[in-house]
Image (spheres, coloured by chain):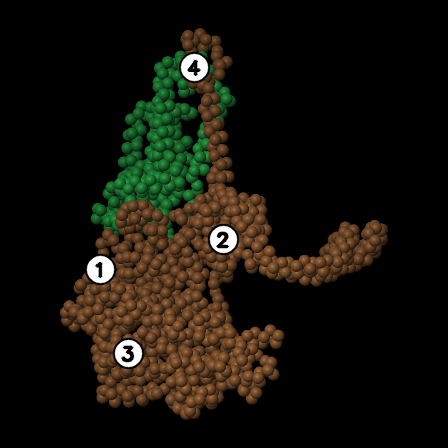
């Protein structure tokens, strides 16, 4: 830029080459050009970033459209081919002809109606505009009238409306001939015409639908046929999908659930999730795992994404669309990252956290099972688990409060009465006395509540279980020198045991052994003669022990490998540790304690406590009150092991067999230090520190609190609250703290990493810390398998405090709620060890080789999938309470007196005798299926659990409560004869398999006694069972197709030769049989038994002298071979 | 050395400005001083040659023939400003594309983040909380800083050095500003890079360990001298503070009057103006670093402990 301002002055001093002016002479074009170009580039970049960079889902969408279209085009010919095949089938042709016929049949009528409708439409169009104009004017004026202020203006508006209504309106309308016609109508006439035309049209439309009904139905039928006979989609459907892809709308696909304040944009990339075609990752034309369909479409059916969204279940940042990492929430600041595939069921627990069992969520359920069965609840509180312990504590607290309140009220009464004595006026005295009176009534209310709470305490104590055995009884139960060996390494002695390993040193083991040994009750149980081990082995194999316990297969002649359930201990080496006499007693009745424990006195009662009050030393369900203070006692061992109602001899046989199970004759190091009283104090401190009392009952530590942290909200704890201790920093950096190498997410610094590492090695976060033994992490090594760690991690990850509204969470009502409540009991007692409770679930026994054979299958405990529909709930309750159906009767009913006498007689001394076996009610029998070798044991459920179980079965079979048995019509004598003929016919020899009460017959019978039916079964179910047993219990030996359908008379008829008398009987044969069964009497059954055979007449021999002998007698008869 | 830790702090989007300042502040200081030196040389030249001073064109460039005496705003100023606008716009574009807003997880009232840090521009204030009571650090000091800045034009009796870079004619003002500004930036840098979990002092390269356990005892100055009861603590502290003010004032006075030029300016300054200047200079510029050093080197918590306030 030339300098024009140059003055003469400067001219004078100008040198030859003037120095250029640093401001005026400098050109900035270069810098400006570069900057401007840079700015343009940067703006281009920002545009790119805006349109593509921040919207990676767009490329996903175009990718999907390409791939999916290609795939669809690929399968189209194939689908068309398949479709053509179906269409060529004669059935389809038939249906198609029917459809075409229907179309033809209705053709003329449809045509006529349609032309009429068209004419009406034309007329309506003609008058719509003038009519609507007039109506709008009237409406506007009417509004004016309504809001007009003064009477006079109201009147004037009224007048103008009237006038307008009378005014003639010019219209031109088509007449029936189709020509336009001018008319003059006033408003009212026009309105009538308009409405009339519309009514007419509505009627015609209805007629049209009616006329087309036949063809619509035929069409539906034809299309359904096609749908049902074609796997996948029809050609047109594929075509439709291809079209959809052609017109694909490239936008964010969003689900908004206002209720839960949820916005999920997952489907912006995961486009295949809800496609009707199932896309899998190994589908070559799809390729990208982001595009696969939801793997469980049924699940999506129950949880439609419109209502539940995606991130509610899966986690992740549903709003995130800028990158995969952001959308999946796997970055530092998103608190709810996408669950890893193996933990995906954690998402279920957010809404299903109150459920013990969530259908389909196997890992989650396994986690919950482990949490309960492995004893986690002993140290960790978790809402719902081990609820009896908490309920019991709160009940006893409430009782204490109520008693204090009672005292206070008593004092008030005294004060009121005293004041009344001194009152100045009669009036005042009366008032005070009235007050004292009402206070007395209040006391009686308090007493009622205390009584109720006491009863609840009794039930809760009955239901409260501990995972480990009662350590008060170990002096009677165990070999002394085995205890330290066990404590050193429980896994070494019994691999897979629930007893974890506490990382104890020698001194600690000595102290703990000494303490628990010295704190145990010092009683010797009555000596028992040896039994027959081979009979014991047979019983052990067959009676049901293996549903919970496992044992080395060789010990029971069933080959190599461990056999049985893992719910309870593996008994392969029980002979190396246990005392035979105690095991006999235990097997005979595991619930029977050595001494009752009084929670109010906080000590075990002794025979002396009883004898002081002149009472026999007897404690059981019926004798559960303390002789000292009248409060409820703990009279059961807190074990889930049920009572198999074995005879004394059988118990001895099994115990003899079990104690013979040894790997070798054990030799243990000397353990005389266990009697060293100086070690006990140290031992007690250790036992308390490690929370042993969480799983075991230990003397003096009955009221110990759980030592672990509560885990109910563990999954939503902020990561900062999970103490990685010295491993925090490397873990945070994404390194493995031990190897220093990079690790992927999910291995260390997140919830999953924390839980998995902790479960794998519970002391891991002590690494590098300088800690005294008291400060160290106390959680023991549990020796979990990897799948168990995954299951527990899933459960813990799902243990979150949810922000979802109650309407979205699962809160079942009625039957479903009963099912969820019942699961807690079903799982607690391992019902599924023997029974098939869920459809698709196999019991432990069902999986065993010995139950695979034909005869073996007959021996399987019954399937309970339809139990609620099958049985009367009242009966079920009674049965679950006492599966021998002995109802308190039995060979020797147990009463306090008889038991005491029995005990007195045997040992001479009460204390000694108390440990002898008491005979028990309903010994050695099954109530319903006496033919099964497996025995339904007595679980001593409390009424709470009984009711929960009954409700469970009723709810699971969609049965409503209360159930009142329907009255069946009594049989006429004709019907009686017919039914009897059916019952005994050779085509259906019912009594061949069903029990009759004859011991010889029952030994080979494979089905229950008919005499139980009226009380036990529901008639509707029974009829279904007769007609289709194979649907209810696949593989049952009950013959199917006993009846065939008679469509003509809409009934089932017997599928076999029927006596001629049936010719005239036109009612349902199955119903007849059910009615007969429900009214069968013992005499009738006996008559059938003898009548059906050529054997000599049977003589009834009652073997049951119980109170219900009249209803359930037993008959013996000799049958011809 | 834990470079990962250092990188994590330095690379946090929140800290871009303060990291940039580490480089920008020295750079612009250097640029300013370079210009000031050139100008000072020119001033010397013009003072030596009164004739030249009369004909000299533009204030800040040595005289050259052919140069215009004055230049128009358009285009000579505006084109430079326009270029600056372009460059700043480019920087902002790139910044906003590459670094997203540093949003964090939803707030959890049950969980305080540790370290819990203010935005970078407030970290100086937060760091001051270590050395003073919240009342002093959070209210009194910021107020004094603001009032001090407002007061400056009124206590300034120097007619020279306005509108161009110069060191010679503006030693006091530039020196005071630099001390204050560098102090402020240093506090922010300490707050950003040095303070880790628990507001513990971690040197750069040390891991910010949440489990760190330290043994540090901070005492009040009177306690060191065995004075532990009121009102003696208050009186002792008051005397110390007063002494500190007097000594600092004398120090400042001595430093200022070492320059002949400043002596002349001092002559033009009224007593009130000078006292006000001294007060703010001591309170804002001297006491803050003094307290920081007393705390960090001698573990002194408070100097002046009274029942109403602590300094």
Specify whether disc 2 shares its chain with disc 3: yes
What colour do you see for chain A?
Answer: brown
Element at badge 3? helix
Question: Could you say which is closer to the camera, residue A578 or residue B59?
Answer: A578
Element at badge 2? loop
Q: CA distance from mark 3 to mark 1?
A: 50 Å
Give the mark, 2 or 3, whose residue is nearer the N terminus: 2
Q: CA distance from mark 4 to mark 2?
A: 78 Å
Q: Which chain is green?
A: B
Circles 4 and 3: CB atoms closer than 8 Å: no
Q: Nearer the viewer, mark 4 or mark 3?
A: 3
Q: Nearer the viewer, mark 4 or mark 1?
A: 1
- How far from the left and from the top, in percent, is residue A964? 52, 80
Chain bearing tag 4 is A
- How far from the left and from the top, in percent, is residue A1111? 45, 87
Q: Circle 2 is placed at which residue position?
A: A278
Q: Give the numbered dot on residue A535.
A: 3
Q: Pointer 1: residues within 10 angstroms few (<14), some, or many (20+)?
A: few
Q: Circle 1 is placed at which residue position?
A: A773
Q: Using the rendered view, name the quadrant where residue A447 is placed.
A: bottom left
Q: Nearer the viewer, mark 2 or mark 3?
A: 3
- How far from the left and from the top, in percent, is residue A876? 44, 78
Chain bearing tag 3 is A
């Amino acid at each position: 830029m030339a300098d024009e301002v140059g003055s003469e002055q400067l001219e004078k001093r100008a040198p030859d080459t003037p120095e250029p002016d640093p401001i005026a002479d400098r050109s900035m074009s270069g810098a400006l050009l570069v900057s401007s170009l840079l700015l343009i580039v940067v703006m281009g970049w920002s545009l790119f970033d805006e349109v593509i960079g921040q919207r990676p889902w767009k490329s996903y969408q175009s990718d999907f459209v390409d791939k999916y279209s290609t795939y669809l085009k690929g399968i189209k010919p194939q689908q068309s081919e398949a479709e053509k095949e179906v269409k060529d089938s004669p059935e389809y042709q038939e249906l198609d002809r029917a459809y075409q016929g229907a179309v033809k049949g209705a053709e003329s009528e449809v045509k006529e109606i349609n032309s009429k409708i068209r004419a009406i439409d034309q007329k309506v169009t003609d008058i719509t505009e003038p009519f609507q104009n007039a109506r709008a004017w009237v409406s506007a004026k009417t509004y004016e009238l309504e809001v007009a202020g003064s009477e006079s203006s109201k009147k004037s508006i009224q007048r103008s409306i009237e006038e307008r209504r009378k005014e003639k309106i010019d219209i031109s309308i088509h007449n029936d001939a189709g020509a336009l016609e001018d008319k003059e109508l006033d408003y009212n006439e026009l309105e009538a015409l308009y409405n009339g035309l519309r009514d007419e049209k509505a009627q015609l439309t209805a007629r049209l639908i009616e006329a087309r009904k036949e063809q619509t139905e035929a069409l539906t039928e034809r299309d359904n046929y096609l749908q049902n006979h074609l796997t996948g989609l029809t050609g047109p459907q594929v075509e439709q999908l291809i079209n959809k892809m052609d017109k694909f709308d490239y936008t964010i696909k969003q689900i908004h659930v206002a209720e839960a304040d949820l916005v999920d944009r997952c489907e912006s990339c995961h486009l295949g999730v809800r496609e009707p075609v199932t896309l899998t990752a190994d589908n070559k034309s799809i390729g990208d795992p982001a595009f696969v369909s939801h793997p469980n479409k049924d699940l999506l059916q129950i949880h439609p994404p419109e209502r539940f969204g995606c991130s509610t279940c899966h986690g992740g940042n549903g709003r995130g669309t800028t990158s995969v990492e952001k959308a999946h929430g796997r970055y530092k600041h998103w608190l709810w990252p996408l669950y890893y595939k193996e933990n995906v069921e954690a998402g279920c627990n957010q809404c299903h956290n109150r459920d013990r069992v969530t259908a389909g969520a196997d890992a989650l359920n396994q986690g919950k099972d482990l949490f309960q069965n492995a004893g986690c609840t002993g140290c960790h509180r978790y809402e719902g688990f081990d609820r009896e312990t908490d309920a019991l504590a709160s009940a006893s607290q409430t009782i204490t409060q109520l008693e204090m309140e009672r005292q206070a009220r008593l004092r008030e009464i005294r004060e009121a009465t005293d004041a009344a004595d001194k009152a100045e006026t009669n009036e005042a005295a009366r008032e005070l006395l009235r007050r004292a009176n009402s206070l007395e009534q209040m006391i009686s209310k308090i007493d009622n509540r205390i009584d109720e709470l006491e009863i609840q305490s009794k039930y809760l104590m009955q239901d409260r279980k501990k995972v480990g055995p009662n350590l008060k009884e170990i002096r009677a139960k165990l070999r002394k020198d085995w205890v330290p060996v066990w404590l050193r390494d429980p896994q070494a002695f019994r691999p897979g045991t629930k007893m974890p390993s506490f990382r104890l040193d020698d001194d600690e083991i000595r102290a703990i052994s000494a303490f628990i040994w010295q704190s145990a009750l010092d009683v010797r149980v009555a000596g028992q003669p040896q039994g027959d081990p081979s009979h014991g082995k047979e019983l052990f194999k067959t009676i049901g022990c293996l549903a919970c316990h496992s044992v080395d297969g060789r010990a029971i002649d069933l080959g190599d490998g461990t056999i049985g359930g893992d719910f309870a201990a593996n008994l392969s080496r029980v002979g190396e540790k246990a005392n035979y006499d105690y095991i006999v007693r235990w097997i005979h009745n595991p619930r029977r304690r050595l001494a009752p424990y009084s929670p109010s006195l906080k000590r075990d009662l002794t025979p002396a406590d009883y004898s002081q009050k002149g009472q026999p030393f007897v404690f059981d369900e019926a004798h559960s009150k303390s002789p000292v203070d009248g409060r409820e006692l703990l009279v059961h061992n807190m074990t889930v092991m049920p009572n198999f109602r074995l005879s004394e001899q059988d118990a001895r046989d099994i115990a003899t067999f079990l104690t013979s199970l040894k790997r070798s004759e054990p030799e243990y190091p000397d353990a005389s230090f266990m009697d060293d009283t100086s070690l006990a104090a140290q031992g007690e401190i250790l036992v308390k520190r490690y929370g042993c009392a969480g799983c075991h009952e230990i003397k003096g530590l009955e009221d110990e609190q759980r030592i672990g942290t509560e885990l109910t909200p563990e999954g939503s704890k902020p990561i900062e609250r999970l103490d990685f201790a010295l491993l925090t920093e490397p873990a945070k950096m994404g390194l493995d703290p031990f190897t220093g190498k990079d690790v992927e997410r999910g291995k260390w610094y997140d919830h999953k990493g924390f839980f998995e590492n902790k479960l794998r090695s519970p002391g891991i976060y002590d690494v590098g810390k300088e800690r005294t033994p008291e400060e160290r992490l106390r959680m023991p090594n549990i020796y979990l398998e990897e799948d168990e760690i995954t299951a527990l991690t899933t459960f813990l990850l799902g243990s979150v405090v949810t922000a979802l509204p109650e309407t979205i969470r699962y809160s079942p009502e009625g039957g479903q709620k009963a099912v969820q409540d019942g699961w807690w009991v079903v799982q607690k007692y391992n019902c599924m060890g023997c029974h098939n409770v869920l459809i698709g679930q196999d019991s432990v026994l069902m999986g065993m080789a010995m139950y695979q054979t034909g005869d073996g299958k007959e021996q399987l405990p019954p399937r309970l999938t339809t139990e609620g529909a099958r049985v009367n709930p009242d009966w079920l309750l009674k049965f679950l309470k006492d599966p021998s159906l002995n109802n308190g009767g039995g060979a020797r009913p147990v009463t306090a007196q008889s038991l005491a006498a029995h005990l007195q007689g045997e040992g001479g001394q009460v204390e000694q005798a108390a440990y002898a076996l008491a005979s028990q009610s309903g010994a050695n029998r099954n109530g319903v299926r006496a033919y099964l070798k497996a025995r339904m044991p007595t679980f001593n459920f409390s009424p709470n659990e009984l009711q929960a179980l009954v409700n469970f079965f009723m709810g699971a079979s969609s049965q409503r409560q209360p159930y009142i048995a329907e009255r069946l019509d009594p049989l006429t004598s004709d019907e009686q004869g017919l039914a009897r003929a059916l019952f005994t016919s050779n085509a259906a020899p019912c009594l061949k398999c069903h029990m009759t009460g004859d011991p010889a017959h029952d030994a080979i019978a494979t089905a229950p006694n008919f005499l139980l039916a009226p009380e036990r079964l529901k008639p509707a179910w029974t009829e279904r069972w007769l007609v289709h047993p194979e649907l209810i219990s696949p593989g049952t030996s009950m013959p199917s197709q006993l009846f065939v359908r008679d469509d003509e008379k809409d009934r089932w008829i017997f599928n076999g030769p029927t006596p001629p008398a049936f010719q005239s009987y036109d009612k349902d044969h199955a119903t007849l049989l059910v009615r007969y069964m429900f009214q069968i009497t013992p005499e009738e059954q006996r008559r059938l038994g003898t009548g059906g055979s050529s054997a000599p007449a049977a003589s009834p021999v009652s073997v049951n002298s119980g109170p219900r002998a009249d209803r359930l007698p037993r008959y013996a008869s000799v049958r011809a071979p | 050395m834990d470079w990962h830790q250092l990188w994590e702090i330095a690379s946090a989007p929140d800290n871009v400005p303060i990291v940039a300042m580490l480089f920008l502040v020295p750079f612009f200081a250097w640029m300013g001083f370079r210009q000031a030196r050139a100008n000072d040389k020119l001033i010397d030249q013009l003072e030596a040659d009164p004739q030249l001073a009369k004909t000299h064109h533009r204030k800040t460039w040595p005289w050259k023939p052919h140069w215009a005496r004055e230049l128009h705003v358009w285009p000579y100023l505006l084109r430079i400003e326009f270029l600056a606008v372009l460059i700043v716009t480019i920087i902002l574009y790139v910044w906003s594309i590459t670094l997203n807003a540093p949003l964090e997880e939803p707030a959890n009232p049950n969980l305080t983040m540790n370290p819990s840090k203010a935005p970078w521009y407030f970290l100086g204030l937060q760091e001051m909380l270590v050395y003073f009571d919240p009342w002093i650090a959070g209210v009194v000091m910021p107020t004094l800083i603001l009032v001090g800045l407002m007061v400056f034009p009124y206590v300034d009796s120097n007619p020279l050095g306005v509108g161009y870079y110069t060191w010679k004619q503006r030693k006091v003002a530039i020196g005071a500003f630099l001390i204050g500004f560098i102090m402020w930036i240093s506090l922010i840098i300490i707050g950003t890079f040095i303070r880790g979990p628990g507001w513990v002092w971690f040197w750069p390269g040390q891991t910010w360990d949440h489990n760190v356990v330290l043994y540090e005892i901070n005492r009040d100055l009177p306690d060191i001298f065995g004075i532990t009861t009121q009102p003696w603590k208050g009186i002792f502290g008051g005397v110390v503070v007063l002494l500190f003010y007097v000594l600092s004032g004398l120090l400042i006075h001595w430093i200022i009057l070492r320059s002949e030029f400043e002596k002349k300016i001092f002559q033009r300054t009224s007593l009130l103006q000078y006292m006000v200047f001294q007060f703010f200079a001591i309170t804002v510029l001297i006491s803050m670093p003094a307290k920081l050093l007393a705390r960090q080197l001698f573990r002194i918590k408070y100097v002046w402990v009274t029942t109403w306030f602590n300094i």
